[in-house]
Amino acid sequence: MSQGRHEDPFADFYGEFRDRLQGDRWRPDVDIFETEKSVVVRAELAGVRGEDLRVTVDGDTLRISGVRLAPEPADVVRLQQMEIATGPFERRLNIAIAFDREGVTAHLTDGFLTVKLPKRARVERSIEVVREMDDE
């Protein structure tokens, strides 16, 4: 008898990719790191064409979205395994470090999108302390 454990009928079909599904979109893997001058976001987007990719900044949120088209079908008789996501994707990332929104750059090379968000220079200022005067 079964112990109440329900097998996932899609586990073998989707493989490890299942964790990257979000509704009707998939989420590309990203690395986020800092250099001395920038916050860098690198997204793995093999097979995505530049014209099918959109990068936007809204406040402190970086949005990477687009579509990866499926390759032309070969003479497939039966699928053995499918792990490469196709179709629309989106990734929204909150960037916790102040950055210059006008200086953001994005480059797609060898299947990796690299977005550089230049850190905003810290401004130091002195604050004058106002004292109450004695009524003498």
Image: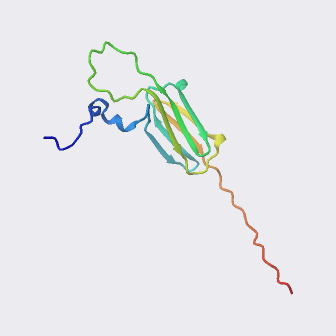
At 72% across and 62% down in the image, what residue appears?
A: 125
Q: Is residue 130 above or below residue 111?
A: below
Outermost residue toward the left?
1
Query: Which of the 4 quarters of the picture holds residue 107?
Result: top right
Outermost residue toward the right?
136
**Who is closer to the viewer here, 67 or 40?**
67
Q: Is residue 28 left or right of residue 119?
A: left
Residue 18 on image: x %, y %: 35, 35
**Who is closer to the viewer here, 25 or 51?**
25
* Image label count: 0
Q: Is residue 94 above or below residue 108?
A: below
Q: Is residue 48 above or below residue 3?
A: above
Q: Is residue 119 left or right of residue 86?
A: right
Q: How is the image coloured?
A: rainbow
**Who is closer to the viewer here, 7 or 51?**
7
Q: Is residue 120 left or right of residue 131?
A: left
Q: Is residue 122 above or below residue 54?
A: below
Residue 5 on image: x %, y %: 22, 42
Quadrant including the C terminus: bottom right
Outermost residue toward the bottom?
136
Residue 32 on image: x %, y %: 48, 45
Outermost residue toward the top?
75
At 61% across and 47% down in the image, what residue appears?
A: 99
Q: Is residue 128 left or right of residue 4?
A: right
Query: Which of the 4 quarters of the picture holds residue 87?
Result: top left
At 43% across and 38% down in the image, what residue appears?
A: 29
Residue 131 on image: x %, y %: 78, 76
